[in-house]
Image: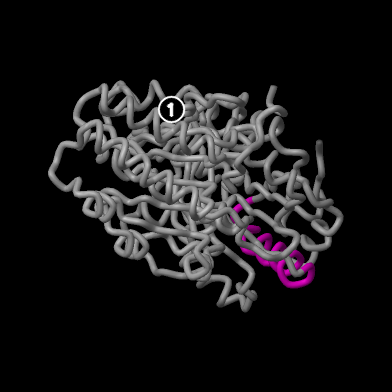
Amino acid sequence: MNAPEIAKKLEDIPPGSAITIDMKIDSYFDFIRATLDLFATRKDLDCIYVTSTIPSDSILNALSVLEVDIDRVYFVDCISHSMMGKTSQSDHVIFVESATMLENIMLKVQYLMKKSKREGKVVIIDSVNTLAIHNNTKILSEFFHILLNNLRSKDAYIFILNMEGQGSEELDNMMNLVADDKLRIPTGDEEGDTNEEVTE
Amino acid sequence: MDAVRERCVTGIENLDNILNGGIPRGNTVLVTGSCGTGKTTLSMEFLVHGALAGEPSLFLSVTEASDKLLKNVIPYDFFDDSLIKKGKLIFIDLPVIYELFGMSKGELDFEDIDLLVKAIEDIVRSLGIKRLVIDSITSVCYQLRTEEKIRQFILKVGKSLSDYGCTSILVSEISPSSERYSLYGVEEAIADGIILMGNLQRRGDLLRTLQVVKMRGTNHSRAKYVLDLTPSGVLLVPLLKGGSV
């Protein structure tokens, strides 16, 4: 499924929904491109991108190669500090020292929500799998429960990335509990026999 | 019961929710914690929101000169320089008052306490102050030395401020390992409210925390929250338990 097809699928999602996006790594940039194109460019929303997977610098570089407009994208970067690398200062990036500081992730999201002057927001959490490397399922479910309820009450669109083959049954059960729906993005190879699935 | 007491809305949204609408007006609240926990920043935001709402607000600085303090304050998105020019937000260095009344000799006696309380009362009355912060009460207590004098000072100043409908914050410094909420133990017993700020170490991470231990005149949460000091002001979220603390 390519970016325009994914964007078409996302169009039906109502605000205030928390959706788990099940996908393979091949679909990663197609999904990001589709989400930013639909919500940031076409719907004119601010996007809050929480990354614990890839440093914000790398995502920004990739998006610029893909010629995606990043003016409305704000990052909560929970990985760069842990890598002890040099971090560049930008109004669009806030750093959290470690992916174990879940409260600070909530606080930075809250700050960006408050700072944004635009009505609606889209929040991408990338990803449940890398957050699970640093946190046990108990604290992670508590984190998602509080954060998602808070964002739902503000009518944000929420997407939680879940990489296929990198999770566990326990993690899947947790996501079933905290999210509203699940959207599977099939890769190009799969599209002959199966299309996207939306399950409750 | 909550409806009976008028509230002094702190303007710190999450804190007002924790306090069920704000600090009951006229209360004297001890904001206590070790260094770097955000006591001064929280107190300053309380005053700025008050000034923005049209309530004359006074910061009595004891430990740090006001001009130096202002330079280190977070550049709030909502801060307006004209608040100071219009006299809605006032900074006074307490050592100036000490000097004015000849109290620079070190230990203050009972007569000095009466003079100091009177001086604060005069400022509050003449300027119509509705919010006051003393940063820090611990430094004032150093000059009072005895529990009896500390008790007398806090009781008198608290009553006087309350009579004028002024809600006050007394900033208290404690060591990180302290099991009390104030250096002398007297301050916490007399205050109407105690807001405890701390640093929580969890698996190598250091989190700033806030807990309302006591607040007369309102129902409130007694849970621990994690806070962040941002240009949008103090933000709070619940401390996650998750079986990992």
For mark 1, give the secondary structure.
loop
Residue A42 belongs to magenta span: yes
Tell me the quarter of the picture where residue A47 sits: bottom right
Position in image of residue B108 (x %, y %): 20, 36
- Most frequent secondary structure within the magenta stretch: helix
Q: Residue at x 32, y 25 (%)?
A: B151
Residue B104 belongs to magenta span: no
Residue B69 in the figure: left or right of residue A187: left
Name the residue carrying label 1: B191
Q: Residue at x 16, y 48 (%)?
A: B104
User: Which quarter of the image is occupied by the C terminus of chain B?
Assistant: top left
Q: Nearer the viewer, residue B160 or B61?
A: B160
Residue B49 seen in the current view: no
Q: How is the image coloured?
A: one colour
Position in image of residue A49 (x %, y %): 59, 57
User: Which quarter of the image is occupied by the N terminus of chain B?
Assistant: top right
Residue B98 in the figure: left or right of residue B197: left
User: Amino acid under label 1?
Assistant: Ala
Tell me which chain the residue with mark 1 is part of.
Answer: B
Position in image of residue B198 (x %, y %): 37, 35
Span of residues in magenta:
A24-43
